[in-house]
Image (cartoon, rainbow, N blue to C red):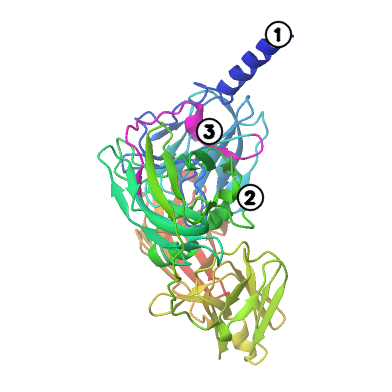
Amino acid sequence: MRYFLILFLLTTTLYSQSEYPQDYFKNPLDITLVLSGTFAELRSSHFHGGLDIKTQQKQGLKVYASAGGYVSRIKISHFGYGKAIYITHPNGYTTVYGHLQKFSNRLEEYIKMCQYQKESFEVEVFPGPDELPISDQEIIAFSGNTGGSGGPHLHFEIRDNQERPINPMLFGIDVKDTRAPHVLGIHAYPKDEQALINGKNSRVPLRLIPKKNGDYDVEKIKAIGNIGFGITTYDKQDLAPNNNGVSNIQTFFNGNKSLEIDFKRFSFDETKHIKRLIDYEYWKTKKSRIQKLFIEPNNPLSLYKDVSDNGYVRVEDSTASVYKIRVRDFKENETWINIPIEGKYQELEIATEETPTDKTQVYSNQSTTLSSGNYTVNFYENTLYDDMLIDFSVSSDTLNLHEDKIPLQKNFYINYDISNYKKPHQDKLFIARLYGYYKKPNYVYTIRKGNILSAGSKTFGTYALAMDTVAPTIKPVNFQNKRWLSKYRYLKVKIDDDLSGISKYRATVNGKWILMEYDYKTNSLVHDFNDNVVTDTKNELKLIVTDNVGNSSTFEATFFRK
């Protein structure tokens, strides 16, 4: 029995140490890894799913397969990852390479065949295990800036067999980092109306006192009742000036662990609930992310462990307590924050608040329908995280639906009855969100069923009915009508639409569809003559561009090649 127990403990220890294979996945670039984004870093509406690797501010670096396997998915889209390759490996993991400029010759030939078959730039294909085998360290692509990239870099992921992204650094992908995380701010939160912090029953900023060793003290607070804390923190690595996400946060109350947030793995189903981790109202008004170190209702995130009382602590009158926060990056560099708490009741400071008599109640656990004028707004069950009083009013064609300070789990739906509009105009109408100082209309994906326009959104704000009667613009960039283009490899065109936005386009030469790659960031369409579909001397180009309400423009030109 003793022998069995020792063997069991040894096996368990070895399994724990080798949970993720080391030295199996290699650096996908042949340069030193420098990151612009770390795993699970906080983004506007999601956790970052991989590593963003800097490519020295340029495109075209060779991208290598991190390990052998087969291409199981190729996706090309205008937004998101742009041009992306997914490689499934024999050990069950999948690596992802995003924002690529182009693929290797073999893969480029394969995907262009698919694009010409489907007559679409945007494609998604799932090759079988025997179609596109990949050897270890094979060149599969070249780095780029496609899709939603804000600059040239390679997005790199490792996913498990349940499609959950995992921090690639757990597999031995190494980045130099000897700096401890920085802390920008600490806030305290009352859990309920009975809790007070420095005489207030609302979020309270606390004064940070930096220490010489890099840790922080916080000025003593006076509190009573159940309270929680929030932290604004980031990490810096040795070879990059940018701010990155941290890897682990732990909290302790009087020496006992209260909560841990471990950013090593998550699922795509839960990433939208980042809005529950951060103080959403503070992010929207201050553009700074406070990570809440307590768990509120309807928070399904799997990042938490060792949680006691949902991360809240109870402060009794006439007590002295200490709350500590430990923040670590992946390389175990750490920063401690020490918060002394005096348990003392204080008179509540009364703040002047808006009287909510003109607000409308919306419940999180039931459906609610609001109607006024031609508008109907549907909130289905679990649209909100909490029951809320919201602003709801309609003036002519404009809908005021609170301010964008409340996080939402899923879409609410705006419906507008256009029966009163003339038939010729009805097809040009859409629902728009008004943003910025000048309340510029921004197209919200709108569908029409009979006389009802419908659009879904996860963002409160001001919405209006808008009309677009102007067709997109089309301008040639590197050619003119009836000119020779024999010396050119690319055919380039600019397209734009200043209201509802580009929906689709189609280009043909001599009646044959040609592939034109669309980059929404530069409003450009580009055809590569090396596709070898333009083979005649005299060529008639026809390009049709359509916006989101159906306005179309047609551009035609003749060019010559030999």
The residue mark sitting in front, 2 or 1, is 1
Q: What x and y, as percent, mark residue 123? A: 59, 49
Work out which residue is located at the far top of the displayed protein and give it.
3
> Is residue 481 or residue 188 the one in the foreground?
188
Give the residue at mark 3. 106
**How far is disc 1 from disc 3 in space, using C-alphas?**
58 Å
Q: Which residues are magenta?
A: 161-183
Q: What x and y, as percent, mark residue 445? A: 59, 69
**How far is disc 2 from disc 1 in space, using C-alphas?**
44 Å
Residue type at mark 2: give it: Asp
Give the residue at mark 1. 2
Q: Quadrant of residue 416?
A: bottom right
Residue type at mark 1: give it: Arg
Q: Quadrant of residue 477?
A: bottom left
Give the vertical position of 441 relative to 410 (above or below): below
The residue mark sitting in front, 3 or 2, is 2
For the image, the number of numbered tags is: 3
